[in-house]
Image: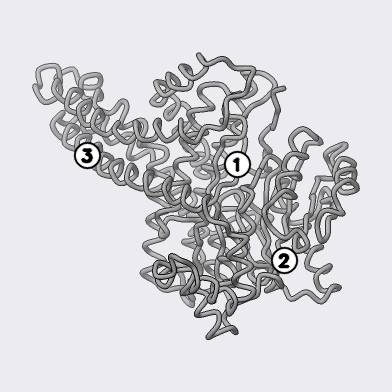
Amino acid sequence: MTDLEIPLGKRTFKYRFFEMLPALCTYFMVVLPIVLSLINPLYAAVFIVAYITWWFVKAAGMAYRTIQGYNSLERAKKIDWRERLDDLNEPDIALKKYQMRPDSKKWLQHQHYLTLQKAQQLPEEYLLPKNVYNAVIIPYMTPNRDVLEPTVKAVLSSHYDLKNLILILAPEQRAKGATELGEKLTKIYKDKCFYMQTIEHPFGLPDELIGKGGNIVWAAEKLQKWLEKKNIDPERVLVTTLDEDNRPHSQYFSLATYEYCIDPKRNHRAYQPIVLFLNNIWDASAPMRVLATGNSFWNIINSMRPHMLRNFSSHSQGMASLVATKFWSKRTVVEDGHQYWRSYFAFDGDYEVTPLYLPIYQDAVLAETYLKTLKEQFTQLRRWAYGASDIAYVADKGFRRGRTVPFWGLVARFFRILESHVSWATAPIIITLGAWAPLIINPDASRSIVAHELPQVASNLQLVATFGLFITVFLAFKMLPKRPERYKRHRNIFMLAQWLLMPFVSVLYGSSAAFNAQTRLLIGKYLERFDATVKSVKK
């Protein structure tokens, strides 16, 4: 098996080259319209129109995926997944139940019915849900009971058999009062589930960055030892990591258990819910609402593109799978997305992320003051954009002799991750400002008809592409939680008007965060600590 660790200290020349590659590509893409404008405005026009047209096609695809993903989300919410787990425990009885229903003809071809038939015929390929445990690890840094306790309550109010639920609160030792809060909550709620414990992560352990990765690894290792004491097979444990502000849908653990039990390759899978940043969306400021809603819909879109789906934020993975990968990385601030690549190489390319069409609700960024909120939002996006560090990891582990993953599959994945990070940094700038480059940069362009017409052509293409934005706005309003009583109806007007900020927010936050992360990799100024996003509650 490939060595899974990220190098510490000095990198090899090959590793450094691929760390620098995303920034080099990004700067090249941004400088190219400027250079082409100086050479010949026509060349710049062709490039910019081609680029915007390419994004127009992508926007059409994303609009379709948005509708498709939203419909999948709504369908999954209407299913009683707890009932389906009970069916899987007794497939013989369940099959007779569906055969006797008035609408039995419809059910004979239903996917759940076919699954029950297979479970009856090949029971060795399936796990009985009653024998499977869900272990939930909640790492946290700040001793904020108003944030953490609602998450604990949401987990313990799940439409799931809590006799099979294990809950681990994982505070940081360096956070004053965090462990005391965990122990207080454990004392209150421990009788509501199979097992609950507070596991403090020590500060200053060797070979780990300050951050979430080391915390959840420490908690998972302690959990592994406890499972061994209880003689619980790790294959019968599904582990979910939640941040302190995460509220899983009431049926999430039932759905995750169902998919885990029926998947014959469960040990080579991760299970990814749809992360929606809607908990406090009414309280967040307008720029943060735009970013939170956009990120929510990006997660919906990716759920419909299995080839692009990666571990993100809250996700579930079998304990046996985690043990095989030695859990998560302790050397990166993006342990969630990086876990995809660790697993991909650990299982020789035989690894996929299965989408779960139920949400886990998270907070939009909200700090004590407006200025601090703006800063915290940038810090969060920069951490996400630092996933560009995985490009060097993929190239180092994959492009070498003795690799154990399929070559062409690796090449496709490598170019997808490279293109996604370069586009993250460059697309908002080129789409918003690129059409004006020839007129601004080249004095001779003022005599060029092409240069004068380019902004109008680009504007027309962008106008058509905004159809996808209208879909997002419409669905965003349908997904909004109930308006708090402290806000009047006119708040809805601001929730609509906020979308006028989209071009500015995408450049000022999306592009700048990606540029910052990639430039750090370019010059070797690495992010060496996980800056936890401040979580506040407005009362």
Q: Position of residue 308 (x, y in %)?
A: 42, 55
428 versus 196 height, above or below = above
Q: Is residue 61 left or right of residue 213?
A: left
Q: Amino acid at mark 1?
A: Tyr
Q: Which quadrant would the C terminus be assigned to in this image?
A: top right
Do the residues bearing badges 2 and 3 touch, measured as CB atoms within 8 Å? no
Residue toward you, 352 or 173: 352
Residue designated by label 3: 53
Dot in front, 2 or 3: 2
Image location (x, y in percent) of residue 218:
78, 58
Residue 133 is marked as 2
The one nearer the camera, 133 or 87, is 87
- Name the kind of residue labelled 2 in the image: Tyr
| Mark found first going from the N terminus, 2 or 3 | 3
Report the amino acid beneath label 3.
Thr
Q: Earlier in the sequence, mark 1 or mark 3?
A: 3
**Location of residue 135 in the rendering, given as x and y in whole percent from the top left corner:** 73, 60
Residue 361's tag is 1
Mark 2: secondary structure: strand
The front one of 424 and 256 is 256
User: Of helix, strand and loop, which one carries label 3?
Assistant: helix
